[in-house]
Image (spheres, rainbow, N blue to C red):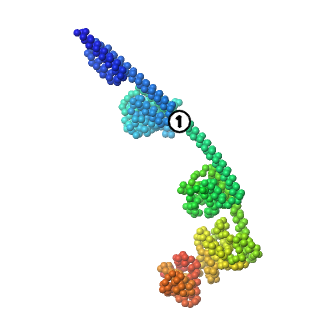
Amino acid sequence: MTRAVSSVDTDASDRIGEELIELLHRADSAEDLSACMARVEALPEDSPRKSDLVELVRMAMAIRHRLDVQHQRESGMLAVIESARDLSSRLDLPELLRMVVSRARRLLGSQVAWLSAYDASLDAFHVLTADGALARGTGQMLAGRDLGIVSVVVKTRLPFTTADYLHDTRFPHDPQLDITFREEGIAAVVGVPLLWEDEVIGLLFVADRYHRTHTTHNISILSTLATHAAVAIKNAMAFEQTHAALRSAELAHTQLAQHAQGVQAAAEAHDQMTSLLAKGATLATICQSVAEIMEGAVLVLDEVGQTIGTGVADGYGGQGATAYHPHGDHSEALARALGESRRIGRSVLAYEADGETCRLNAVIGGNDVLGTMLLFRTEPLDGLAVRTYERCASIVGIVLLSRERTEASQSRDLSSLLRGLLSPRQDDLHLLSDRADRFGVALSRPTSLLLLETRATEASYLLRRLRSTPLLPHTLFDEIDGVLTILCATTRADDVRRTIEDAARQHFGAAYLGVLSRPIPQPSEIPALYSSLRRALPVLARIGMRGHIVGQNELALYSTLFETHDQASLHAYLKSTIGALIAHDEKRGSELVATLLAYFDCNQNAKAAAERLGIHVNTMRQRLTTAEGLAGHWGNALRALEIHVALRLWTLSGGAKEGVQNTTSALTAEGEPAAR
């Protein structure tokens, strides 16, 4: 019987031994070995081989543990080798760091891992990459140098681990980090430094959402990976510095090439402008050349902002030069820029609008400002281009100064000729006629005089404008005692009159008055007619005829009648004669004054006057009846003359064109309102 029991125990021992070898061979889990241990410990206490079997299982479990440790070491070594391989074969820093973090989490079997780098501008460590995070804030954590695990690792430059981060009192906590850790559910954390030359440049963390203690081996592997990450960061920084140096060298080379190109272009531009200047090129040619050189649009302005030269490069689409107006939206900016340009002696940026810049350069001649040069461009200018533009402005200044001297010489000849013709003691008319022929005025044919009066400074300005533009070809003109005096062929008198009126209206509004003479058949009659026109100008001022140039024939009667009267007496005359008619027209919107003037102009023929006004003859008679009731009976020839003169005077003073408002106000200034 005893022999049978011993046989059974031997068989059981053999089976357990075989099972242990099989478990170790299959590399089964430690739980399987624990189950085998439980079965051995369940054998009867009096079993002769129970203790041997227990020891056998323990030995198997020890072997299994050594195999696990060996496997972990092999895995760690493989991870280190793979990390080193990545480090030597990849230059993409973000991808390298992501692989290091992912490998660290996988190797330690942790749930979360992240890597932080030091940012000197923030004096803190911020997360570069994270793996396994669930909360959004984990990848955005910012840790100060003196808070959390960071403070311990930075201070000791050694790894640090905690099984329960939120309740660990070995370091000061960062409230914001604690909130993030709670949202992520982190409990155990291990952190290792990224060291480079004894400086902590970052930290590598792995964490779990349960309490856990990491082995020394795990921490060692993590430290190795952290070292690899530090090398990767430094390599990337060195690589970036190398690239930055290369880019800087390339940029310097490009800038040097551009500078050389700019110097060459500036030299060519200077040669081109000098050549044009030597050839006596016109201002228009100079402006176009500058526009082509500067690849934009150019305006040259006189001292009051009027355009005297333009140029636009082929293909330039900016509209700034086209939209320029002396009193436009940018006039204040241009005035400030002109003052600044004069002060520093350089060009300045005046303004920018609609993607286009306007650069201004004052054109100086001696101590005087000859004008202004504007450059419009859609692209910015470098320093060399600005200097080229300023040299071009100097060339323009030479052209303007030369033109000013030429015009001054020509103006002296023209002024001398005109004054000689106007003088009562005319010199040799034959010589004067020859000189006038050179200016395109034939004194052998009828001529006409035009006098324009405005303020003296404005007359001088208009004279300069006329001299700088081809508005008055084949004419003699000058400012004489504050009055612009023009002598031209009678065939051109109407054209000259319109040109002068347009220019005066543009610059002075209605603050001017003028008179155009009747044809002058002989040059010997010019002095007497000039004196007569000069006497007529005060008459025009007295009767308020500003804003018009009146023909001498229209003014002859009034010069005789009102040459010695002032404006107040003329107003009194109009008021006493036709004041009631004007007041009626103003109050009721009627046209009695115009109707009565047409009636007198048609020799008191109602039918002819009605046809002139385009109304029915019965309407004409009704208006005349009303007018007679207001102005009185004009059957007497003297009374008819008084009314006709007053109506004509009222027309010349602007009443017929501008309405009765201003005239009536003037006529009733000293009496009752016109509506009464």
Q: Position of residue 628 (x, y in %)?
A: 51, 87
- Look at the picture and state if 159 lies above or below 138: above
The reply, left or right, for residue 163 in relation to residue 458 is left
In the picture, residue 192 is in which quadrant?
Answer: top left
Find residue 493 and report its image quarter: bottom right
Does any portion of residue 203 appear in the rendered image?
A: yes
Give the residue type that dot 1 points to.
Met
The residue drawn where x is 65% and y is 48% is 263
Say which residue appears at 68% left-offset and 74% top-offset.
487
- Above-or-below relation of 43 to 218: above
Picture coordinates of residue 630, whole percent (x, y): 51, 85
Whether residue 562 can be seen here: no
Front-lying residue, 4 or 326: 4
Which residue: 55% across, 87% down?
604
Picture layout, residue 11 above or below residue 429: above
> Which of the two residues, 569 or 85, is positioned nearer the viewer here?
85
Camera-nearest residue between 126 and 16: 16
